[in-house]
Image (spheres, rainbow, N blue to C red):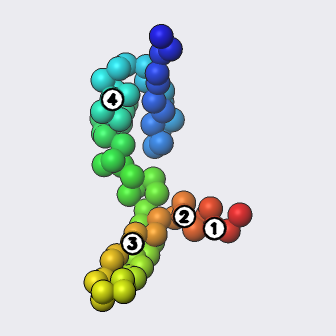
Amino acid sequence: MSEQSITCPKCGMTSHHPHDVLEKYCGNCRQFHSEMLDEVDPVVMIRTQFTKSGKAEKHEIRASDIRKEAK
């Protein structure tokens, strides 16, 4: 059985604790990764697209998405 780990996108600390891996939690920052996402990779634009039926769908564009497109 391989040991899993998770690395915090904010502080870079790696945890091997199973609950941290499961919950995507950083004990050093005392935050869940989902809570810090906007700090690490902010939403820079919201794009609205309309479906054929006329329904508006909003899509968040994050800084990392723009960096990927630029490559």
Kindly identify which residue carries mark 1.
69
Residue 43: percent from left, percent from top: 42, 67
**Pointers 4 and 2 in contact (CB under 8 A)?**
no
Q: Nearer the viewer, residue 36 or 51?
A: 51
Residue type at mark 3 is His
**Pointers 2 and 3 in contact (CB under 8 A)?**
no
Q: Residue furthest top?
A: 1
Residue type at mark 4 is Leu
User: What is the C-alpha distance between the residues marked 2 and 3?
Assistant: 12 Å
Residue type at mark 1 is Glu
**Pointers 1 and 3 in contact (CB under 8 A)?**
no
Q: Secondary structure at mark 3?
A: strand
Q: Secondary structure at mark 4?
A: helix
Residue 42: percent from left, percent from top: 43, 62
**Pointers 1 and 4 in contact (CB under 8 A)?**
no
User: What is the C-alpha distance between the residues marked 4 and 2?
Assistant: 25 Å
Earlier residue among tags 2 and 3:
3
Kindly identify which residue carries mark 4.
22
**Pointers 1 and 2 in contact (CB under 8 A)?**
yes
For disc 4, the neighbor class at 10 Å (few under 14, some 14 to 19, many from 20) is few
Earlier residue among tags 1 and 3:
3
Earlier residue among tags 1 and 4:
4
For disc 3, the neighbor class at 10 Å (few under 14, some 14 to 19, many from 20) is few
The residue mark sitting in front, 2 or 3, is: 3
The residue at the point 30 percent across, 83 percent down is 56
Residue 59 shows which numbered tag? 3
Q: Nearer the viewer, residue 57 or 20?
A: 57
Kindly identify which residue carries mark 2.
65
User: What is the C-alpha distance between the residues marked 1 and 3?
Assistant: 16 Å
